[in-house]
Amino acid sequence: MTLDAINFWLAIAGTVAFAVTAVLAIADRGVDIFGVIVLGVITAVGGGTVRDIILDVPIFWASDLVFVRVAVASSILAFVARKFFTLPQIYTLMIYTDGLGAALFGMNGALKCWELDFAWPLGPIILGVITAIGGGIIRDVIVGRKTLIMSTEIYAVPVALGCVLMMALMYFFPDDKGRVLVTCTLFSFGMRAAAIRWNWQMPAFLVTKSKALWSD
Amino acid sequence: MTLDAINFWLAIAGTVAFAVTAVLAIADRGVDIFGVIVLGVITAVGGGTVRDIILDVPIFWASDLVFVRVAVASSILAFVARKFFTLPQIYTLMIYTDGLGAALFGMNGALKCWELDFAWPLGPIILGVITAIGGGIIRDVIVGRKTLIMSTEIYAVPVALGCVLMMALMYFFPDDKGRVLVTCTLFSFGMRAAAIRWNWQMPAFLVTKSKALWSD
Amino acid sequence: MTLDAINFWLAIAGTVAFAVTAVLAIADRGVDIFGVIVLGVITAVGGGTVRDIILDVPIFWASDLVFVRVAVASSILAFVARKFFTLPQIYTLMIYTDGLGAALFGMNGALKCWELDFAWPLGPIILGVITAIGGGIIRDVIVGRKTLIMSTEIYAVPVALGCVLMMALMYFFPDDKGRVLVTCTLFSFGMRAAAIRWNWQMPAFLVTKSKALWSD
């Protein structure tokens, strides 16, 4: 399998996981099947849509509807079989796959910006993070849930650090795109997986409610 | 009157209804006249704005400000005469006109995507729904109300089904644009009107809180 | 110093104030340093980003990252030294500088639309307001705070009136761009400063909860 093919199939797995975790996140709220599909699709493709709008390039799902189709099918599946997806082992698998999807979407988003030479080095980092977490934030805002940004879970930080690492590596190895992509995705997913496994939280001194470093 | 002229005047009526129902929806919240105008305009033109951004075409209201002007005027009118618009008969008329506006905006949005050959067949359906309900969702998010997606009211589903029907009909009758537009708008509005008249709700087995179809 | 240089340095001051007041606004919510940076940057550059997307021109911060850099640095500074920034005199200074930023961003946003001949006269007014308050609204929506639109504070109205004044002046003095910009910015900031100083609120008859003007 080529790197492109691996990347594609992992992106499909990530899309499934994004849609499924979206449906599970709202399952206790009394949303109908139409809302379930809308929110599943938004979660799966919303971040990449915002990225492409900011980049002013054609929306990625318009030229190939496979990601929207997979998101619709996964949302319906998650709705119908939500008891299955909340089984502890399956749910855990989904959470890790969701983390892999975030790493993968984030790194691919950052790489797309890098290839378009968009606002290096902060542009690719910002748009990588938006690609990974933008859809979930739009979902939470529409649903009225507390958004990811307001939690101290280690979810977006691995994506951001992966993008920073990618910009550094691409600066030194501009011809090694494939290897840089793999390295940064593994780094980002590894950090997220560790955060899930050991339930890492942001240290208190990096959270606003704790005592300010500067004291009067 | 030509079909274009009928379409235009119905769109004006829909814009009035969108702005008026927006103002009535927030009238109990202590919003000032500036906020009222902002929210009325967002509700009326927000969905089409998001659609045009995703299509990457000029925003529809920029070339002809009549829709923004009508939305501003309707919002002010609804603010000043909100006791009039909450009279039962007038309010009911507004709810039906709002449903007509949603059907009309949705079908015209889907048709615009179809003409631009954007991501057939899911693209026109997605953007048709965004055209119809996007503005109302942005309004509810800014206001902090429960959004449409979180309700089991039959509001967006007639738009989505109308768009599905339109894609099917345009596939078989690509030269009958006018008749397809009228048919799908009537179908979509008819379903919405029936939902208002008989207070239809989504059946429980299509809502997440009910028992999952798949049981462990 | 040329007008452009003054404009630039005031925009930097406004960016600092936007990011700092954003961080202070969420300091009681338990947001981590990553969230603080995201929200500070969104508040500072979010409005201009939405404006440029609607105008379909390159995003202003992509060609020169200085505004994003200043927003990141200010957010970190505000996080670390939040006790300093909540000292009464410093906080008051920040509130006024934030008002200056809103006036400046609003007027520059409206002027940019005017120069692009976008939907005169309502287009520049709408996009001027979006430039000034769009970022703050996105922040409040993500954070789950009551948005500006739902308050009766005199914050957006001076921006809107400044944009109206600008469109009138540009109509009569199209060659006096510099002077019109200065006049409208001073007018808008002056009104906001007065509203802060004397705690102006919208008069009750312009707020929805008060008695409707039209009575049945």
Image: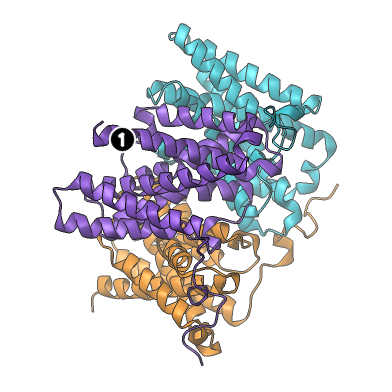
Chain colours: A purple, B cyan, C orange
In the image, C46 versus B48, the foreground residue is C46
Viewer-side residue, A156 vs C42: A156
Please state which of residues C109 and C97 is positioned toward the viewer in this rendering: C97
Crowd class of label 1 (few under 14; some 14 to 19; many from 20; radius 10 Å): few
User: For the residue labelled by badge 1, is the local secondary structure a helix, a strand or a loop?
Assistant: helix
Q: Residue at x 25, y 59 (%)?
A: A121
Left or right side of C186 for B77: right
Residue type pointed to by label 1: Ile
Residue lying farthest right?
C216
Q: Tell me the chain of label 1.
A: A
The extreme bottom residue here reads A216
Could you tell me which quadrant the N terminus of chain B lies in?
Answer: top right
**Is C46 in front, or is A103?**
A103
Residue A59 location, quadrant: top left
Question: Does residue C203 appear to the left or right of A58 in the view shown?
Answer: right
Quadrant in the rendering for residue A163: bottom left
In this picture, residue B84 sits left or right of residue C64: right
Q: Is residue A1 visible?
A: yes
**Rendered position, C32 above or below C59:** below
Name above or below for residue B165 compared with residue A2. Answer: above
x then y, percent, for residue A148: 53, 56
Q: Quadrant of the C terminus of chain B?
A: top right
Q: How many marks?
A: 1
Counting from the top left corner in percent of width and height, residue A192 is at 43, 55
Q: What residue does disc 1 label?
A: A6
Residue placed at 69% from the left, 41% from the top? B21
Residue C38 picture quarter? bottom left
x%, y% of residue C148? 59, 63
| Residue B37 percent across, percent down from the top left | 61, 51
Q: Is residue B9 visible?
A: no
